[in-house]
């Protein structure tokens, strides 16, 4: 099956289409190389392992699966990551979200400003801690985009539009995402089972998708520096390495990541946790996947 033949099997709402389009510009249009190998264009950071909400579609709603540990990323690790990104001339995004609510980290402004030296910085938040002053500080900390997930209802649109205006930042700095829908509309999300940890909603069967491009273009880094294949692995089943022990690029081209990347490019979800995942992993990263296919299989 060629890259072009991958087709969507489930309709998505307008808000999700807009989000996919926005990310496509970043992921698919940014294909950079280091030492002859494609490097990621999308890196998610889990700054803090706690959330102030318990959304039913999120593993955090079940303490037995994803308890709040309150562990947080420190500046030593942020400095190390920034150094690693500069070394490979990184051109993509670093997205602050992961397994918790990033705005609960007390050093969010300092972290954002440091990472902005090497990457396009985005923050995904539930908006609960935001005020006009906080939004302004994030903008002045060189954050590129602030994405607010609106879980409570349409009335939040007016609230955050007013807040954004009063913060005196560009209107396109803030992106609001409609997440107040019920189970019939998948809560406004591109709903997945988070590698077998979430069953609520109209979930695709685990065998629906086989190919996946996540390890071809992205990675997730946890609060302690552990690197995971993607944000779907909520139980942190397979660590690829740790950036405090190795450079990010060495982990990216290492044998563990390579095995998963090769298998998923061949449509083999045979390794844990991929064999438990129902995510449609071919929405983004086509250029990266094609580049890796040319390296591995031609």
Image (cartoon, rainbow, N blue to C red):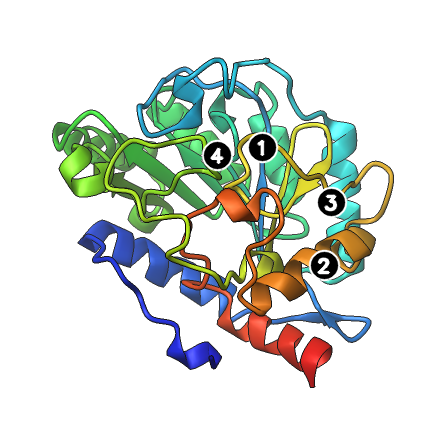
Q: Please give the label number shown on residue 46.
A: 1
Q: Position of residue 24 (x, y in %)?
A: 42, 64
Between label 1 and label 3, give the one nearer the viewer: 3
Disc 2/disc 3 C-alpha distance (Å): 11 Å
Residue displayed at 45% across by 35% down? 196
Residue 88 appears anywhere in the view: yes
Label 3's element?
loop
Q: Which of marks 4 and 1 is nearer the N terminus?
A: 1
Q: Quadrant of the C terminus?
A: bottom right
Q: In this view, does 266 lie to the left or right of 170?
A: right
Disc 4/disc 1 C-alpha distance (Å): 17 Å
Between label 2 and label 4, give the one nearer the viewer: 2
Q: Where is residue 77 in the image (x, y as percent from the top left)?
A: 76, 33
Badge 4 local density, few (<14 within 10 Å), some, or many (20+)?
many
Return the residue nearer the eye: 179 or 82: 179
Q: Please give the label number shown on residue 240.
A: 3
| Residue 241 sits in quarter | top right
Would you name the residue on which mark 4 appears?
A: 138
Between label 4 and label 1, give the one nearer the viewer: 1
Residue 287, relative to residue 219: is it above or below? below
Q: Which of marks 2 and 1 is nearer the N terminus?
A: 1
Between label 3 and label 4, give the one nearer the viewer: 3
Residue 91 appears anywhere in the view: no
Q: Please give the label number shown on residue 259.
A: 2
Residue 291, relative to residue 101: is it above or below? below
Q: Are marks 4 and 1 in contact (CB under 8 Å)?
A: no
Label 1's element?
loop
Residue displayed at 51% across by 60% down? 212
Q: Position of residue 239 (x, y in %)?
A: 71, 39
Disc 2/disc 4 C-alpha distance (Å): 38 Å
């Amino acid at each position: 099956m060629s890259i072009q033949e991958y087709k969507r099997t489930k309709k998505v709402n307008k808000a999700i289409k807009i989000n996919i389009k926005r990310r496509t510009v970043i992921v698919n249009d940014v294909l950079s190389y280091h030492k002859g190998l494609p490097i990621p264009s999308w890196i998610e950071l889990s700054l803090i392992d706690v959330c102030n909400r318990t959304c039913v579609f999120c593993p955090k709603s079940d303490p037995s699966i994803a308890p709040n540990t309150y562990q947080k990323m420190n500046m030593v690790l942020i400095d190390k990551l920034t150094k690693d990104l500069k070394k490979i001339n990184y051109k993509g995004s670093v997205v602050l979200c992961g397994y918790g609510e990033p705005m609960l980290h007390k050093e969010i402004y300092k972290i954002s400003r440091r990472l902005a030296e090497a990457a396009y910085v985005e923050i995904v938040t539930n908006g609960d801690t935001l005020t006009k002053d906080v939004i302004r500080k994030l903008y002045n900390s060189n954050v590129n985009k602030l994405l607010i997930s609106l879980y409570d209802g349409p009335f939040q649109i007016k609230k955050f539009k007013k807040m954004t205006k009063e913060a005196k930042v560009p209107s396109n700095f803030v992106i609001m995402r409609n997440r107040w829908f019920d189970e019939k509309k998948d809560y406004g999300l591109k709903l997945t089972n988070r590698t077998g940890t979430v069953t609520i909603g109209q979930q695709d069967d685990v065998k629906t998708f086989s190919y996946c491009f996540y390890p071809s273009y992205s990675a997730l880094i946890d609060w302690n520096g552990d690197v995971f294949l993607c944000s779907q692995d909520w139980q942190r089943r397979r660590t690829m390495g740790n950036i405090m022990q190795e450079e990010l690029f060495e982990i990216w081209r290492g044998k563990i990541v390579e095995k998963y990347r090769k298998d998923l490019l061949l449509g083999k979800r045979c390794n844990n946790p991929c064999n438990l995942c129902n995510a449609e992993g071919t929405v983004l990263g086509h250029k990266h996947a094609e580049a890796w296919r040319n390296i591995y299989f031609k």
